[in-house]
Image (cartoon, grey):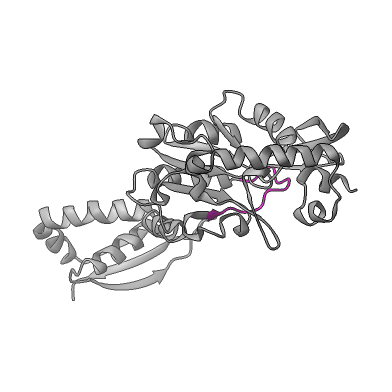
Amino acid sequence: MNNNDIIYQQQQEQNEKKPSLIEQLCSCIYFFRKKNVKINERYQLGIDTPKSHTRKVCVLDLDETLVHSQFKAEDGYDFLLNVFVQSQLFKVFVTVRPGVEAFIESLSEYFDVVLWTASLKEYADPVMDIIDPQKRIQTRLYRESCTPIKGGLTKNLKKLGRSLKDVIIIDNSQMSFLFQPENGFLIKDFISDKEDKELDLLLPFLIWLSQQSDVRPVSQLYQQYLLNNLNPRKSSKKSILSQSMVLNQDNILKSLQIPRTHTLNHHDFEDIELRQEAGLNSPHVELKMQDQTDDESKETIEISSN
């Protein structure tokens, strides 16, 4: 059996494999245990804590989201784990996504953070102990908490026992939030890029999302957030310019009546554009290029009133 199949326990191989006596016994124990707690199934994952009633839940995937693991050494891996599965030793080489520890620390200030992986506990726990040494993530869910579907496994967020308006899942696989697509944020796969900035870029959005009444649909809210923050400097400048126009409109109009030659940079062109957007009488602008003696050419315009 391939090492990866042992660590990640693919469902197809599980179905084809004849269970051992121990596995059959464990299955029986699991069946009766599940039967006894079926009434409380909604809260069986242990997420329903007093804190959970005041904060939203952010579910984080592990593999290709926070780390990338493999069974051969590649240049740039961050640490080596000795993992025992079914009494066998496997050497796992782990590469950590840049900024993981700081990301988890900051995220935990705004969310109840849950680690939910389709991998085995024997592998996931030692990885999390290293990348989350302060135990900011207090709840860890593994493969047995996933739901088998055709083609793989998914994570049914209803099992968390929380209103779905308060739950977001960050995963590199859409299959992981197949049951609740409006709650999912599809993050770019992480393999080994040491210049990766995804977590740093995502954190401000998540902090903003934690203050919203409903996190759904996550993907649309993310696009809205990007549009609102695409050019904050221009938005701020436009607001300041609008106030200046109201308070000093007479002075501005007088100044526009004075013909003059002015050397502009790109910020000046932006001011003219904002004036036009504000609906002011735009001055006649004639662009001229001057030869420059330095390396940077400058644009000279002559402004006169209409």
On the rendered structure, is 294 left or right of 72?
left
Residue lying farthest left? 250
Q: Tell me if residue 280 can be seen.
A: yes
The region drawn magenta spans: 185-196
Can you tell which quarter of the image residue 45 is in? top right
Residue at 48%, 48% in the rendered image: 168
Residue extending furthest toward the bottom: 306
Between 290 and 153, the residue placed more toward the observer is 153
Q: Is residue 302 left or right of residue 113?
A: left
**Residue 109: x percent and y percent?**
43, 31
Q: Nearer the viewer, residue 125 or 76?
A: 125
**Location of the C terminus (image quadrant):** bottom left
Front one among 241 and 150: 150
Question: Residue 278: x and y, percent?
Answer: 21, 66
147, above or below 259, in the image: above
**Residue most toward the top?**
134
Residue 127, placed above or below residue 261: above
User: In x, y percent, where is residue 97?
Assistant: 65, 40
Q: Relative to 137, does residue 214 appear above or below in the rendering?
A: below
User: Main structural element of the magenta stretch: helix, strand or loop?
Assistant: loop
| 261 within the magenta span | no
Q: Quadrant of residue 153?
A: bottom right
Residue 58 visible in the displayed image: no
Q: Where does residue 183 sit, x and y in percent of width and height?
A: 47, 54
Q: How many callouts does the rendering have?
A: 0
- Look at the image and say whether residue 192 sits in the magenta stretch: yes
